[in-house]
Each structure stands twice: as C-alpha cells, then as structure tokens.
Image (spheres, grey):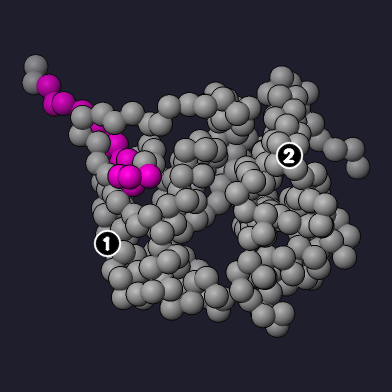
Amino acid sequence: MAELTRDDAIVTTALHDAEQAAAASGVSIRELTTVGEHAAAIELLSGIWQRSPENPVVPPELLRALSKAGNYIGGAFAEDGLVGVAIAFHADPGRHALYSHIAGISAAHAGHSIGFALKQHQRAWALRRGIDAIEWTFDPLVARNAHFNITKLGARPHEYLSDFYGPMADGVNTDDETDRLLIRWELRDDEVSLRAGGTPLPPAGRMPGDLTVAVPSDIERIRREDRGEAQRWRFQVREELTRALDAGGRIVGFDRSEGYIIRPEEKTQERTP
C-alpha cells in the first residue's frame, strides 16, 4: 500500500529538520521493522528501565503486532549500533494524535541531543501521515524531562494522572507511585516548528498572577538517597499541580529554578446592565 503523505511546506521542512537533527547528533534514524531489530529495541529499553529479560518493557509479540499495524517504531543508530528507541501508536481518531508510549536513549550516548533528533523523526513521520499532534506522559518530578518536553520541544501538559501505571517492577519506578503528566505536542504550531529547526526561543514570560510549582533539581538522586523525601515531593507536587489544573489553570512553561509556570483561568468579569 502506498504511504499516505501530505505534500505541503511544513512536512518538507519537518523532514529536513529531522535529518539535520540526526546529523548534528551523530546518528541515523529509521523505522525498525525486523524481528531482530525489535528484539534489539526491547533489549535496549529494558536495560534503560532496569528490567529483567522475563519482564521486558514491551512484549516482543506486541511490538511485532504494532509494527505490522502501521504504528511508529523508530531507532537511532550510532557507529556502535542501536542507541535510541521510540515506540508510538495511533490514538483514538477523535484525538487526531499519535500516542508515544516509550522512548529511551542509552546512558552511554546521553547528552548528544539524540532524544531531540528521535522526536523530530517521529514528528516528521506523523505529519507525513496527516497526524497533527503527538501525546505522551512523563514523570512531573523529573526536571530534565520537563525542560526537554516543554522548553525544548514546545509541548504542553494538560492533564495530571495520579499513579497512572500503578506499581511498576523496574529499577526506575520501584517503591514510587507512578504519577504522570499527559502532554500534547501540536506539530503544526509555529513555535514548535521554530524549535524543530533549532531556532532559540525565549522562555515563557511570567505574567502577573502566574503561579509556580517547584520540583527538585534531581529527583533521581533523591530517590537513591532518601525515599521518604522523594515521596514527600511526589505528594506535594501532585497536590499543587492537581489543584491548579482542576481550577482551569494551564501549564505554559517550565523554569529550571522555579519549576512549572501555571497561568490561572481568566475570570470573566460580570457586568450589570
């Protein structure tokens, strides 16, 4: 079957931006389609999440089915082989989105913007198929992920999910409740397009009345050293973000020193005739 495409300027630019991002990171990125490639993807991701072979992040049969059904399985390759993987599947048609389930980069290759390049490849892949948004979740306590998702990519969180996955048997989430922020990346947004092309944009400006919710600079270190403190951070951030979002606030930015920047719902002034 011929691949569905949208032959417009933004798709062409997205493909170019993805190629440039991969080149700048020193990797090549392509879809993973074979049994061997899928096995390598599972092995890499299971290592990142510290899972045993008996408890992979994605069962191999499911990954094969997702691939056959036309979903996204992308891999980043360096000279020493597969170093990054992202897996996404089509969301409910009414959401007009791709749902990115998991993405990870080998620790040995961290710090080279491979994650950014992989997301740009995923963006171009989605746009070529007429998909205008990508959604995924991330742990709101991990400051580097919040900075990457909100500041570097230009995605916006819109829902707080308490203990979303329930208990997880891996070396990253063990003994912690799996709260997540659901984020949406509008692929045709002007700011998203500028960020994809490497144009630096100023951080979200603060307006009078904006709120902030602080997060620790390194929750992963805190989890290793003091589980009690990590749990206190979890409950505090859950309470503050949930309260703000339930009241109609929007997360409009992330500041490394202050945390999440939240803009309260604009109040419509009542008028009397």
- Between disc 1 and disc 2, whose residue precedes? 2
Q: Is residue 79 left or right of residue 118?
A: right
Asked whether the viewer can see residue 226, the reply is yes
Whole-number angstrom distance, CA of label 1 to CA of label 2: 38 Å
Q: Residues within 10 Å of mark 1 (few under 14, many from 20)?
A: some
Quick one: SS at disc 2?
helix
Mark 1 lies on residue = 236
Of circles 1 and 2, the one toward us is 2
First to last magenta residue range: 256-271
Q: Amino acid at mark 2?
A: Ala
The residue positioned 35% from the left and 69% from the top of the image is 230
Q: Is residue 197 left or right of residue 267?
A: right
The spot of residue 68 in percent (x, y) is: 83, 57
Q: Amino acid at mark 1?
A: Gln
Mark 2 lies on residue = 22
Quarter of the image holding residue 161?
bottom left
Quick one: which residue is furthest to the right in this view?
1
Quick one: SS at disc 1?
helix
The magenta stretch spans residue 268: yes
